[in-house]
Image (cartoon, coloured by chain):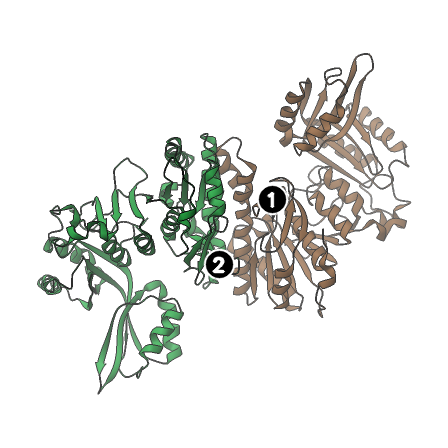
Chain colours: A green, B brown
Amino acid sequence: MKSPVASVPATAQTIRVLKFGGTSMGTTPERMRAVAERVAAVHREGHPVVVVVSARGATTDELVADAQSASAAPAAREMDQLLSTGEIVSAALLAIALKEAGVPAVSLTGAQAGIVASGQHGDGRISEVEGSRLREVLRGGTVAVVTGFQAVGATGDVVTLGRGGSDTSAVALAAALGAEVCEIYTDVDGIYNADPRIAADARLLDRVGSTVMAEMAYSGARVLHPRSVELAARAGVSIHVRSAFSEEPGTTVVSDETGEEMLEDAQPVTGIAHDTDVARVVIRPGTLAHRGTELFAALAEASVSVDLVSRVGDRDIGYGWDFTVARSHLDAVREVLAGLGCEADVHEPVAKISLVGAGLLSKPETTGRMLAALGRAGIEAYSVSTSQVRTSFTLPKAHCGRAVGLLHREFRLDRPAETPGQALAGHAVAV
Amino acid sequence: MKSPVASVPATAQTIRVLKFGGTSMGTTPERMRAVAERVAAVHREGHPVVVVVSARGATTDELVADAQSASAAPAAREMDQLLSTGEIVSAALLAIALKEAGVPAVSLTGAQAGIVASGQHGDGRISEVEGSRLREVLRGGTVAVVTGFQAVGATGDVVTLGRGGSDTSAVALAAALGAEVCEIYTDVDGIYNADPRIAADARLLDRVGSTVMAEMAYSGARVLHPRSVELAARAGVSIHVRSAFSEEPGTTVVSDETGEEMLEDAQPVTGIAHDTDVARVVIRPGTLAHRGTELFAALAEASVSVDLVSRVGDRDIGYGWDFTVARSHLDAVREVLAGLGCEADVHEPVAKISLVGAGLLSKPETTGRMLAALGRAGIEAYSVSTSQVRTSFTLPKAHCGRAVGLLHREFRLDRPAETPGQALAGHAVAV
């Protein structure tokens, strides 16, 4: 991403970038006024303000349902065109509410705000923010209300960034405009070290490192869009997650450099994430010959993200592969497999649980301790995979809640961290 | 408008431009499929097809209500941004439904379709159709589903064309692509010679001249957007109005040249239009001095259309003005009057009734006969004004229905026209 930070005009006040999710925007005039009042307060302090908004309430789900009532497999390009309207409505209504509150405001679509994306429809990646119009708006003292989730592609058409992509929009704008912090207002109080709906003693964190947070987000913690965490870390932007419904201080996601030395003595596991929308695909040994490269290239081509990949089989029976994908990608996976003519077993629904922490590989006992605790509870773990920052496995979905709870206790996540640097990330409810 | 007719590729089949209104698009999957099937049938005949769509059902009204719950006076620029989403949703869903029916289709916003407008937000005028993308889509055998009602303005922002503006979008596209006919599918069977809800014996017309139709549309007949009729006449495009819900043949609006000789012996009155959303403004003599020019310039500046203008008063008491405006423009009018410091009486709600016909001025008895018929029924007419093609007056709204009925009988509009050239235009229900 081109970062036009250098060309940001000197202002007395720092630029503030605030993002409001769908539940925060709500569907009532009262909710809209509450958001407008919150933005107005920041504007009154003299800050240039960019607000990034999601579609109100269940708008996106309703539009998806409308599309599916017209076709079981609507074209991705038309879905992008369709879904982008949800954020446009949000942004225009918030601009109207802000003006009513005496705050000059203008709504901008992703294209109007200069957010450019590459990649496929429904899965775009922000490649550039051409912020000249945005800066002109801010220079005039006007609040820019920008649609999240959407960008303009090379052909001039709308490209959306995937569910939750508004977080990434907000971080990209913060980076482009030179804001130090991107404020994410949501319907939870911040980042917990496990899903509070499952682990009753889950704790709210005041700080969490970006590597851990990114790993948590990719592993199923839905409070932040995974790419937003990655992008923020790369751009040196802190993310501040807090409630749109209260004045609670929330959680700050800090870049790892900030707290690296504090992380060294941390407990090995700093949070537990889980994802119950997973399928496990096992390609039968011998049916794919040596075409692993072709397989993963074809999956990438079809925009399917794979996780927990392991090679199975041996020279005698031949080789196969074991990996997990999001269930929503299963149709695409089946198409790829059919194209390669190989046989596979698909297990679904399965859950994926991940223990996340800085330096897990340097604490090799973690995986053993995890498997032992599961074994004592009679829970079988599949697809076990360990990296520098997480160790993950799959299990039947029905056992997910019990497993998260027992691992939470096993790794002492119910007790306060001893140093702030131990800040833990966890699964939180969907934004 | 630049007319790129010359560059239209030679095709075996003529280009068909079909427009579907909000009620025709409906809000159910069944309605969407019915529209898709209708379009698919035309595509199967081998025609390049452009479909222009309005927002589904009451979408626009709902968005307006949402905006008004945020502010009593939402900014026009934000309203345009907001309302444009209704047509985008319609177009994307229809494209999805068409593909499901096996017809390649792509949805295009006004901007993507190259529809450029000048003028104010909420009241844009199409100034150009830059149809290169549209033609590329059609060349590939793909149906282009274009959002009606919206265009792109000079700044790259959305500019809408006023309520009913989708008709004008469709005609502009027909003109730009060299289509001879613009087909308007709506929720009525065609053009009636009076509002069938008021005049029980109103007749459906098979043909109507464009001058009469334009005058009718401006005078309150809501089945076609007034500017669409004007634009069609100028561009030599016929408009074919027919039901989206039946196979009835509907009404063709033909350019006057086509039937001019037939119109000569026609009855003087060829249709009756009425508009019940009118206010009558009377500027008290002496309070405006000689500033008539300033007054009308200021009203034009505020995008207020005036009708039935007459000068009142005399040299002794001074001069004033009597005119009508749409009630929706009253706030703007009051602002203008306050700016000029003059006193006015505003009468509302009043109705405006117009007798429309080619060559009314050459039949001077028409106005007398009209006033006599009203007088016999005890109905007082105000603001009487006569032009070449219509004679109009205002009256208290409560008497409107009775007056339309009695004039319909007085001018024999309940009997079939003696020649096709007598084709009559009338008020029809809102699109």
Q: Residue furthest top?
A: B316
Left or right? Give the position of B286 relative to B360.
left
Label 1: how many residues lie within 10 Å, few (<14), some (14-19) or many (20+)?
many
Q: Quadrant of the C terminus of chain B?
A: top right
* Residue at 83% across, 15% down: B315
* Residue at 48% across, 63% down: A75
Q: Chain of mark 2?
A: A
**Towards the viewer: B231 or A41:** A41
* Residue at 65% across, 32% down: B302
Q: In the displayed structure, would residue B202 be above or below residue B394?
A: below
Give coordinates of residue B102: x percent, y percent: 55, 68
Q: Is residue A200 visible?
A: no
* Residue at 40% across, 78% down: A339
Q: Which mark is residue B18?
A: none
Q: Are marks 2 and 1 in contact (CB under 8 Å)?
A: no
To which residue does mark 1 refer?
B160
Quarter of image, res A15: top left
Q: Secondary structure at mark 2?
A: loop
Left or right? Give the position of B338 relative to B29.
right
Left or right? Give the position of A323 relative to B105.
left
Q: Secondary structure at mark 1?
A: strand
Q: Chain of mark 1?
A: B
Q: Is residue A215 visible?
A: yes
To which residue does mark 2 refer?
A153
Quarter of image, res B159: top right
Q: Amino acid at mark 2?
A: Gly
Q: Amino acid at mark 1?
A: Thr
